[in-house]
Image (cartoon, grey):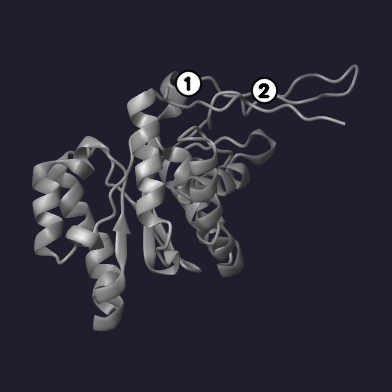
Amino acid sequence: MAKVRKAERRPPLNKTHKLKRQDWAKKYLKTGFSKVLWTDEMRVSLDGPDGWARGWIGKGQRAPVRLRRQQGGGGVLVWAGIIKDELVGPFRVEDGVKLNSQSYCQFLEDTFFKQWYRKKSASFKKNMIFMQDNAPSHASKYSTAWLARKGIKEEKLMTWPPCSPDLNPIENLWSIIKCEIYKEGKQYTSLNSVWEAVVAAARNVDGEQIKTLTESMDGRLLSVLAKKGGYIGR
């Protein structure tokens, strides 16, 4: 009849945010989204997100015992991208590395560019549009200039509206992966083990699932316009 769910967390939208979201939707309404690479980072902890350890138990049964650790026992930062029906990555950010502009660009060089992008044809590179959110390490002058030297500039670098995680289809991929790796209250004992779980879960996401996410963009843009820049369901 019903299920327990954690409330979604969203940054507040003011009038300026809503106007920028509408402008973004109008700008990209006629875009062929099969050529857009949607990217983002995700952090996974050993213990999982807050609220994932709750569930129903039978009368007379004892609640399962869980390890209790500070900050979820630590975690791993993961980067990935999706384009059309293809998953790019996931790639693991080296433990202890804080992503600033310089380390973010070096990370992209060592993973995305060397391991995936360089293998693509010239025509693919010419048409691909790179999407990233407005995190400081992404949107800084240093990162923008660095990407431009890689040929990702102007119309090849998607403008992104503020406070808009609901518009990025890779957020749905993160939800799929987290549901899998933390099912039944699963906890991990090492950073390597939770990383291996992420890789295994990502491999189980097939091309049709990814295609469903990337093909949802036309509907998302129309929803933004219909809601006058307000949040849409993910």
Against 219, residue 175 (above or below) is above
Query: Distance between the Cα atoms at labels 2 and 1?
Result: 13 Å
Q: In this view, does 6 lie to the left or right of 84?
A: right
Tell me the residue that label 1 is attached to.
69
Q: Is residue 21 left or right of residue 202?
A: left
Residue at image location 22% in from the left, 68% down from the top:
114
| Residue 62 image point, x, y percent | 80, 19
| Residue 231 image point, x, y percent | 51, 33
Q: Is residue 1 left or right of residue 29?
A: right
Residue 192 visible to the viewer: yes
Quadrant where the image shows the N terminus: top right
The front one of 173 and 33 is 33
| Residue 200 image point, x, y percent | 53, 57
Tell me the residue that label 2 is attached to.
65
Residue at image location 27% in from the left, 46% down from the top:
94
SS assignment at label 1: loop
Residue 91 visible to the viewer: no
Against 61, residue 130 (above or below) is below
Against 152, residue 52 (above or below) is above
SS assignment at label 2: loop
The front one of 166 and 187 is 166
Q: How many neighbours does mark 2 have within 10 angstroms: few (below 14), some (14-19), or many (20 or more)?
A: few
Amino acid type at mark 1: Arg
Residue at image location 36% in from the left, 34% down from the top:
19
Amino acid type at mark 2: Val
| Residue 146 image point, x, y percent | 10, 55
Residue at image location 42% in from the left, 62% down from the top:
30
